Amino acid sequence: MQILITHGTLARTRVLHFNRWQMAAMLISLVAVLTLLSGTVYHFVFLKAAREGWPVVSQIVRLVVRDEFAQRDRFMRENLDAMAQKVGEMQAKLVKLEAMGDRVSGLAGVKSDELRDAPKPKVVPGGAQGGPYIPPQAVTLEQLRSIVDTLDETADQNADLFTLVESRLMESRLQSLMVPSTAPVAGPIGSGFGFRPDPFTGRSALHMGLDFPADVGTPIVAAAGGVVQLTETHPAYGQMAEIDHGNGLVTRYAHASKLLVRTGDIVKRGQLIAHVGNTGRSTGPHLHFEVLVDGVPQNPARFLAGGSAALAAAEKAGRNRP
């Protein structure tokens, strides 16, 4: 490319030669200068006009930046709505975790209030203090979103863990409720489990349960929860009831004067099922109480010991099953 420069007075002409690379460099330089100039004008003129409220320039600036502000506001609103929804979900999960924690602590025998009101270290006012200075750092939107996602994942994992623990505790509690560890009659034991002289013949014979002497009409309660599998009048046991507690574990209540349950009834631990009597092969009013595992008599005293001793007796009886 050639550029001719002619001076009118001297009538002299100067010729400047530019190749395409030089022209490209000049164009780029021109664009850079214009960009820098426009930025300078915008910064020192338009922004100052917008801040100070110049009559015409400030309105022009508002028109230029209005769309930009609107886009920023829309972006912030959308992100705030998303964060608010996420926080709401987190609050719901925390409420669910708190309720589940109360149930689990109840099953474990621990009061949740005692855990919340744990003793805190006593701070002495005016004492010596120290440590490195770590100023708070601003959290970006991406970091905040990452933190919320991490908390959400942790809450889900804790919920699953609580569910598993609650299931195990419930299984343990149900197992303990199905073990006959509650005395069926309030009072002392008249005759224990084992060999003794038969009260009618005087010969040595195996006594397969415990006798609870009591007045006629004394309440008889279920030693554990279960299903009534048999109610009948037996020549030796008199009016009797049997309760199935599962896993081959059965309790038998004999010599009753009146039965209050029928076959197929579901009973709870401590529920009234009969009254003490003197029916069958008996020398006086009392309750004959037996515990059987797969039909084999067990010593009821081991079960009535309660707590871990009752569970151990039930587990031992279960291991001895063929």
Image (tube, rainbow, N blue to C red):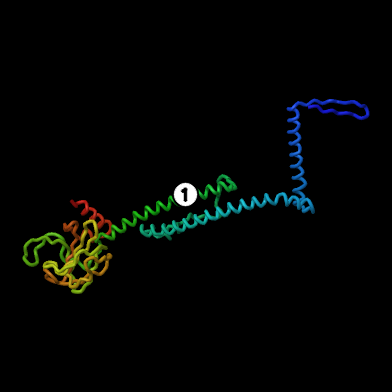
Residue at label 1?
153
Secondary structure state at the residue bearing disc 1: helix
| Position in image of residue 21 (x %, y %) | 73, 27
Q: Considering depth in this image, is 254 or 218 the residue closer to the camera? A: 254
**Disc 1 crowd, CA 10 A, few/some/many (<14, 14-19, 20+):** few
Along the line of sight, the residue nearer the viewer: 23 or 50? 23
Q: Residue at 67% x, 51% y: name it.
A: 69
Whole-percent x, y for residue 72 in the image: 64, 50
Residue at the location (82% across, 26% down)? Answer: 16
Q: Residue at horizontal 58%, vertical 48%?
A: 141
How many numbered discs? Answer: 1
Residue 29 visible here = yes
Instruction: Identify the residue at horizontal 61%, vertical 52% (top origin).
Output: 76
- Side of 203 where 64 appears, left or right: right
From the top left corner, tell me how far across and down residue 247 is, in percent. Answer: 23, 56
On screen, residue 232 versus residue 123, left or right, reads left
Quadrant containing the N terminus in the rendered view: top right
Q: In the rendered structure, which amino acid carries the disc numbered 1?
A: Glu
Is 63 located above or below residue 37 in the figure? below
Q: Position of residue 93 (x, y in %)?
A: 46, 56
Is residue 186 shown to the viewer in this render?
no
Between 254 and 45, the one nearer to me in the picture: 45
Residue 203 falls in image quadrant: bottom left
The part of the image, by quadrant, that contains residue 178 is bottom left
Taking the image as shown, residue 15 lies to the left or right of residue 245, namely: right
User: For this rendering, which residue is in front, 266 or 112?
Assistant: 266
- The answer to whether 42 appears left or right of 238 in the picture is right
Going by the picture, which residue comes out furthest to the right? Answer: 9
